[in-house]
Image: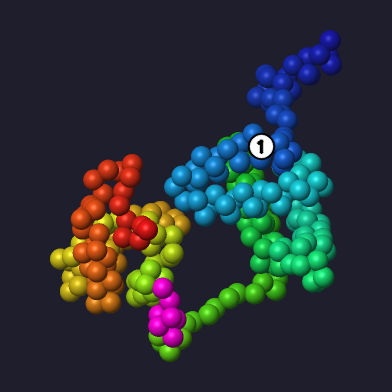
């Protein structure tokens, strides 16, 4: 009687409930995280979806981590994943006689960032009480390459007209390539400022939406393409089939 009463108190009377079972990383990925990433980014920012998909693939291939419950993931287990990826032979497009090596530190850290996002979402959705603080590996190489005006001139001199136009816009506006490819005629305003402006509607994050001023070079490139395509379309009248400056 006393034992039954204590059990009853533990389960309800004093507000203590049975603890929900915690899924493994692989179960959570398949049931919730991967569908969320696909639904959120596949049609809005494909590069983000590809990033999540690559990280998910690496995490689930490492069985030790994939079969670990979310609330048992620690820096120690992440370190084991890092060692596995650094020592695992990978071809990565090389020939049979070329050296095969593991992932670079930057690629492993990219995957750890995906894991961080996953655990933060799990905490936000109530699957786990809190997300652990996962450390990144030291020694990541940060690429900082600045193209000089001389190099830019040499490239534009030999590039095809389409590549030269795109490169000019990227260099003068600072847009990401994906933002440039998404440009639509209705995003251009010829009257704003001194040379006109470009509205970036979609980007890597919500903060990427912005208005950029055109330089004389950018205006010249876009005006040339506008005049060349004017007989086909001058605006995105059909949202399902928008006409873009850099369509073939």
State the scheme by which the image is colored.
Answer: rainbow
Q: Residues within 10 Å of mark 1 (few under 14, many from 20)?
A: few
Which residue is rendered at x = 43% and y = 81% of the image?
A: 158
Q: Is residue 192 magenta?
A: no
Assign the C terminus to one quadrant of the image. Answer: bottom left
Residue located at (73% from left, 46% from top): 60
Q: Position of residue 156 (x, y in %)?
A: 40, 80
Quarter residue 220 falls in: bottom left
Tell me the magenta residue range.
154-160
User: Could you say where residue 103 lies in the image, as x and y percent from the top left?
Assistant: 73, 64
Tell which of 179 and 122 is nearer to you.
Answer: 179
Residue located farthest toward the bottom when viewing the structure as drawn: 150
Give how far across and how far down residue 135 sits, in percent: 69, 61
Is residue 174 in sight in this rendering?
no
Q: Quadrant of residue 203?
A: bottom left
Front position in the image: 49 or 111? 49
As helix, strand or loop, the secondary structure at mark 1 comes to helix
For residue 199, above or below residue 117: below
Q: Which is nearer the eye, 242 or 68? A: 242
Query: Looking at this rendering, what residue extends furthest in the left direction?
Result: 191
- Residue nearer the viewer, 141 or 216: 216
The percent coordinates of residue 179 (x first, y second) are 40, 60
Quarter holding the N terminus is: top right
Q: Residue at x 69, y 49 (%)?
A: 57
Mark yes or no: residue 138 visible: yes
Horizontal placement of 172 versus 237: left or right? right
Q: Main secondary structure of the magenta part?
A: helix
Is 155 one of the magenta-colored residues?
A: yes
Residue underneath mark 1 = 30
């Amino acid at each position: 009687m006393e034992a039954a009463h204590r059990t009853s108190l533990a389960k309800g009377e004093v507000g203590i409930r049975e603890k929900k079972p915690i899924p493994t990383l692989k179960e959570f990925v398949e049931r919730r995280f991967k569908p969320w990433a696909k639904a959120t980014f596949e049609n809005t920012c494909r590069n983000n979806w590809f990033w999540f998909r690559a990280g998910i693939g690496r995490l689930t291939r490492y069985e030790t981590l994939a079969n670990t419950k979310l609330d048992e993931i620690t820096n120690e287990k992440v370190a084991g994943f890092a060692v596995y990826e650094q020592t695992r032979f990978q071809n990565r497009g090389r020939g049979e006689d070329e050296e095969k090596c593991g992932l670079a530190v930057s690629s492993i850290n990219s995957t750890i960032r995906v894991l961080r996002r996953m655990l933060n979402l799990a905490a936000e959705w109530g699957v786990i009480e809190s997300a652990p603080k996962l450390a990144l590996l030291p020694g990541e190489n940060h690429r900082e390459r600045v193209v000089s005006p001389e190099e830019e001139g040499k490239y534009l001199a030999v590039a095809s007209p389409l590549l030269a136009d795109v490169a000019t816009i990227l260099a003068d506006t600072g847009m990401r390539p994906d933002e440039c490819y998404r440009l639509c005629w209705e995003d251009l305003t010829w009257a704003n400022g001194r040379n006109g402006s470009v509205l970036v509607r979609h980007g890597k994050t919500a903060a990427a939406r912005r208005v950029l001023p055109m330089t004389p070079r950018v205006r010249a490139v876009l005006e040339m393409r506008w005049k060349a395509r004017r007989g086909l379309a001058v605006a995105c009248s059909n949202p399902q089939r928008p006409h873009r400056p850099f369509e073939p």
